Amino acid sequence: MPLLDVRDLSVVFGRGPRTVTAVDGVSFTVEPGQTVGLVGESGCGKSVTSLAIMGLLPRRGNTVTGQVLFDDTDLLQLRPHELRDWRGRDIGMIFQDPLSSLNPVIPLGVQVAEVLERHQGRTRQAALREARGLLEAVGIPDPQRRLKEYPHQLSGGMRQRALIAIALACKPRLLIADEPTTALDVTIQAQILTLLKELVDDSGTALVMITHDLGVVAGLCDTVNVLYAGKVVERAYRHHLFAEPRHPYTDGLLQSVPRLDAGRGGRLHQIRGSVSDNIPWSEGCAFAPRCDRVIDDCIGSVVPLEPGVRGGALRCTNPVPLEVPA
């Protein structure tokens, strides 16, 4: 049985005729110890999906439907005080911007310790001692001194490590990482990804990695869900996705990544248009206005997500053909 089972999750912002569907029937599962990726351009619904799972969307101005089953408990049906018992203890989250996620007027040690006090009943002194060990475990130098410092006194990499320490304080069974390396330089990105991989391998924690960086996916994820305009357009195991992308959007993303073995002076492939150039999913494929493989059948009827080869899934009328070995 999967640890997390997201079924037909939809998030609609606004009321009446002026609404925006940010997440449109997203479904995926996460097994214990598995790393699952949610990949796509900015605005495809990745972060909103994670916030809906965690129950962190604003209470007003949006409508969330579907099911989010964690150990057969539907998180969407829990009351706010009940959901707070799950967050931090069983499900941890690493947010995208550590500077805005940490409280600027509270010392770092107190912010790490309060998770242990809230969910494990530690005293303040015991929690601070354990917080020191957590900061040391995530690679923050001189953790005893850092406990008394404020977020603005830390570098970007240290703040991100502090968020990881907070998320892992209670040894959650599921960790959601929302683009944890976006604002970091390449060296620090590699360190953070290595740290996440080691922590997941050592603790057996399941990980949902939300990113637009295909390099992160290649080095970390087991299964990948590619999102476009709020829907999953392709699902595949990591190696199969990189070797044989079937959806034109996935293929375009992979071709746009610079390659070290490419000849000098060549132009990078680009996906024409922008995210706003789409049509409603009820009228066809939302990617059709930007797609190089568009045909008449792509427009006019709903394109379903159908089982693909090798255990994957695909939402496309005219997919990229598989290469036939000579």
Image (spheres, rainbow, N blue to C red):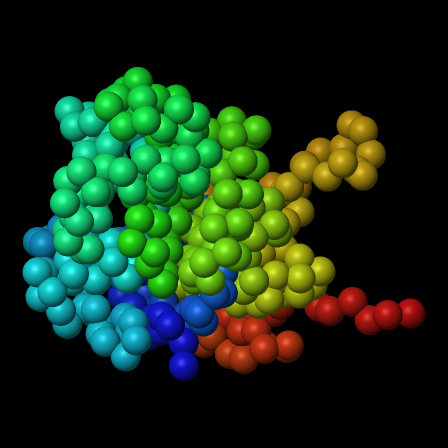
Q: Which image quarter holds the N terminus?
A: bottom left
Q: Residue at x 82, y 34 (%)?
A: 263
Who is closer to the viewer here, 257 or 302? 257
Q: Residue at x 13, y 69 (%)?
A: 78
Who is closer to the viewer here, 296 or 180? 180
- In this rendering, does residue 291 appear at all? no
Q: Height in image: 83 above or below 97? A: below
Q: Position of residue 104 (x, y in %)?
A: 19, 25
Q: Height in image: 109 above or below 38? A: above
Q: Position of residue 203 (x, y in %)?
A: 45, 58
Q: Which image quarter holds the C terminus?
A: bottom right
Q: Quadrant of residue 105?
A: top left
Locate residue 75 relative to residue 197 in the image: left or right. left
Q: Residue at x 49, y 60 (%)?
A: 35
Q: What residue occupies the far right of the structure in this picture?
A: 326
Who is closer to the viewer here, 283 or 76? 76
